[in-house]
Image (spheres, rainbow, N blue to C red):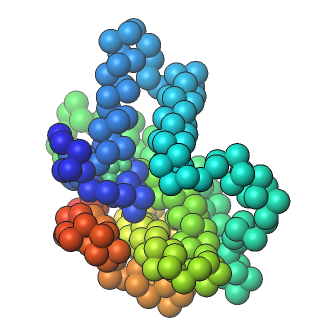
């Protein structure tokens, strides 16, 4: 993979579910993570251990600092002076605007409700899977197995998305505030980042709704709970589309960014819409 084949910033607007991603080949984060994993395995280290993960984080931060120092030197900027100014100036610490707090509350409500639903599903799913396994020895259970596989897919989807939605929504709303507060030449960048983060929220909400529908059909004892979550997800979806309308047209992989096109005379690769996984 040559450096030029990576899509710049693709990892900022994905769901970080690399096992299911169609774009690993053009993702710098995936490339670096895999390289680290292979290095640890060669050394007999466990790449999943916390200790090793923290060492990787430390090494990546040191690398980022070296790059920043090199850039600052080239531009004649003192990082020490910048750090002092930054510590004294609190104006850059942007929070979502007050009017956006209801959306954040909805996302937190959805996150907690999904967590409770997953807790309620675990024992029921386990009992049903045991029953199918026992019957598999003397009868055809392929229909039941297919149905359980769909439920398992829905369970995994909600597991993955319920935290992501809350985190990415905050990022999207901080971007709105930054676009309003920052200098004019930074506004496009903040608006782009906000739309990209909101697009992740939008896709995850749509997948969550599809997954909830599967769970609704699977177990009628969970239906009241599921309906509440569907209502919350729909409110959130309408809220984010109304607050950040560009999220509806922000494709994945991310579209060409106009300021890079201007600087480099070409874009970073086009976008075909991301594919869903609940089939
Ligand atoms: S773009 Fe794909 S491969 Fe890269 S971090 Fe996101 S999910 Fe993983």
Q: Which quadrant of the rendered structure holds the N terminus? A: top left
Task: Pick whichever, 151 or 97, lies toward us.
Answer: 97
Task: Pick whichever, 41 or 153, lies toward us.
Answer: 41
Which residue is pictured at 54% across the width and 33% down the height?
62
Residue 273 image point, x, y percent: 23, 71
Residue 243 image point, x, y percent: 54, 87
* Left or right: 81 as drawn, with respect to 28: right
Residue 188 image point, x, y percent: 45, 80
Where is 180 relative to 274, above or below? below
Which residue is pictured at 44% across the width and 88% down the height?
245
- Residue sticking out furthest to the top: 44
Where is 235 relative to 169, above or below? below
- Residue sticking out furthest to the right: 88
- Residue sticking out furthest to the bottom: 242
Visible in this render: residue 155? no
Which residue is pictured at 21% across the width and 71% down the height?
265
Residue 20 image point, x, y percent: 28, 49
User: Residue 112, located in which quarter of the rendered image?
Assistant: bottom right
Task: Pick whichever, 87 or 138, lies toward us.
Answer: 87
Visible in this render: residue 35? yes
Where is 68 relative to 90, above or below? above
Where is 150 relative to 195, above or below? above
Which residue is pictured at 50% across the width and 90% down the height?
242
Q: Which quadrant of the rendered structure holds the C terminus? A: bottom left
Task: Pick whichever, 24 or 92, lies toward us.
Answer: 92
Label count reads 0
């Amino acid at each position: 993979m040559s450096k030029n084949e990576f899509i710049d910033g693709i990892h900022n607007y994905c769901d970080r579910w690399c096992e299911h991603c169609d774009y690993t080949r053009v993702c710098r984060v995936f490339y670096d993570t895999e390289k680290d994993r292979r290095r640890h395995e060669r050394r007999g280290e466990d790449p999943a251990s916390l200790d090793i993960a923290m060492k990787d984080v430390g090494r990546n931060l040191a690398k980022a600092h070296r790059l920043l120092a090199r850039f600052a030197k080239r531009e004649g900027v003192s990082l020490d002076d910048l750090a002092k100014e930054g510590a004294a100036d609190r104006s850059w610490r942007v929070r979502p605007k007050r009017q956006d707090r209801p959306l954040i509350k909805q996302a937190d409500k959805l996150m907690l409700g999904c967590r409770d639903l997953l807790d309620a599903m675990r024992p029921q799913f386990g009992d049903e899977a045991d029953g199918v396994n026992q019957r598999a020895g003397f009868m055809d259970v392929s229909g039941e197995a297919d149905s359980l596989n769909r439920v398992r897919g829905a369970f995994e989807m909600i597991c993955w998305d319920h935290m992501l939605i809350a985190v990415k929504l905050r990022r999207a709303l901080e971007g709105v505030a930054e676009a309003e507060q920052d200098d004019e030449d930074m506004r496009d960048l903040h608006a782009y980042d906000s739309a990209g983060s909101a697009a992740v929220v939008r896709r995850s909400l749509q997948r969550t709704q599809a997954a909830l529908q599967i769970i609704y059909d699977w177990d009628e004892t969970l239906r009241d709970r599921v309906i509440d979550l569907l209502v919350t997800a729909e409110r959130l979806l309408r809220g984010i589309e109304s607050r950040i309308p560009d999220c509806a047209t922000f494709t994945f992989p991310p579209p060409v960014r106009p300021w890079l096109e201007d600087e480099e005379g070409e874009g970073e690769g086009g976008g075909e819409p991301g594919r869903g996984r609940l089939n």
